[in-house]
Amino acid sequence: MIQRIGVAALCLLLAACQSMPPAAAPTNVLVGDAQVRAAKLAQKARIAALGLGQVACDAPAWTMLGRVALSNGKDGGSGRIEWTQGAGRTEVTLSAPVTRQSWTLTADADGVALEGVSGGPLRGTDAGQLLRQSTGWEIPVAALGCWLRGAPAESGAMGEASSVFGIDTRLLRIEQGGWVIDYSNWQPDPDSGVELPTRINAEQASNRVRLVVDRWDKQ
């Protein structure tokens, strides 16, 4: 049985425990049929340019560096995050600058491991389930690999997605698998020019993940 470290332990790691209010509904929503169709075509082209298409969310290889805040409706915390994916492997490191503590989640064909926790490393077969059982946090790791880049996850894993676009034709929101993912800022990739989100809020009931991206890198 996986040892449970609990929400309080992760809050101590992140060194900034507090609850977070829900995100506000998006404004300036694009509603015209022709404009929405054009926005969907632009989104499809952007996803293809990112190399996603119909493949898994861990392709192609990339790294995201930034800041994250987590909340389950009662407790929460914030810290630095480094997320690397590619070649069938995901590695997520969360660290607290004040305490200098960190934990790392890795997932590949051999399974999932969570290091840096009491009694660890903990092992399992599903990243989201391991985090839920060991920390109490509901974090859809596999789907986030797509959502972080402003793309819906594979429908087989999370169900069909719906998208909302702003009057500037940029993606404002994805709703999928009971989660609502909002995008409030974008920046062009310096190499390809493809826009990537830099502020992301993901919510499901009382579970919230908020990210501010400092840098995107290709592997």
Image (cartoon, helix red, strand yellow):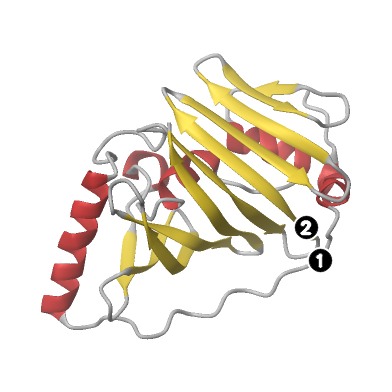
- When the figure is inspected, residue 9 is found, relative to residue 194, above or below; the finding is above
- Horizontal side of residue 69 vs 91, given as left or right: right
Q: Quadrant of the C terminus?
A: top left
**Residue at horizontal 55 percent and vertical 14 percent from the top:** 110
Q: Earlier in the sequence, mark 1 or mark 2?
A: 1
Q: Which percent across, then down, holds residue 91?
A: 58, 31
> Could you say which disc has been placed on residue 99 in the image?
none
Q: Name the amino acid type tagged 1.
A: Gln
Separation of residues labelled 1 and 2 (CA atoms): 6 Å
Helix, strand or loop for disc 2: strand
Q: Which percent across, then down, holds residue 13?
A: 84, 46
- When the figure is inspected, residue 213 is found, relative to residue 112, above or below; the finding is below
Q: In the figure, residue 71 lies in which quadrant?
A: bottom right
Q: How many marks?
A: 2
Q: Quadrant of the N terminus?
A: top right
**Residue at horizontal 54 percent and vertical 56 percent from the top:** 213
Q: In the figure, residue 101 lies in which quadrant?
A: top right
- When the figure is inspected, residue 212 is found, relative to residue 126, above or below; the finding is below
**Residue at horizontal 77 percent and vertical 57 percent from the top:** 77
Residue assigned mark 2: 77
Residue assigned mark 1: 18
Q: Which percent across, then down, holds residue 123?
A: 69, 21
**Residue at horizontal 11 percent and vertical 77 percent from the top:** 34
- Horizontal side of residue 25 vs 203, given as left or right: left
Mark 1 Cα shell of 10 Å, populated few (<14), some (14-19), many (≥20): some
Q: Which percent across, then down, holds residue 52?
A: 29, 40
Q: Nearer the viewer, residue 150 or 213?
A: 213
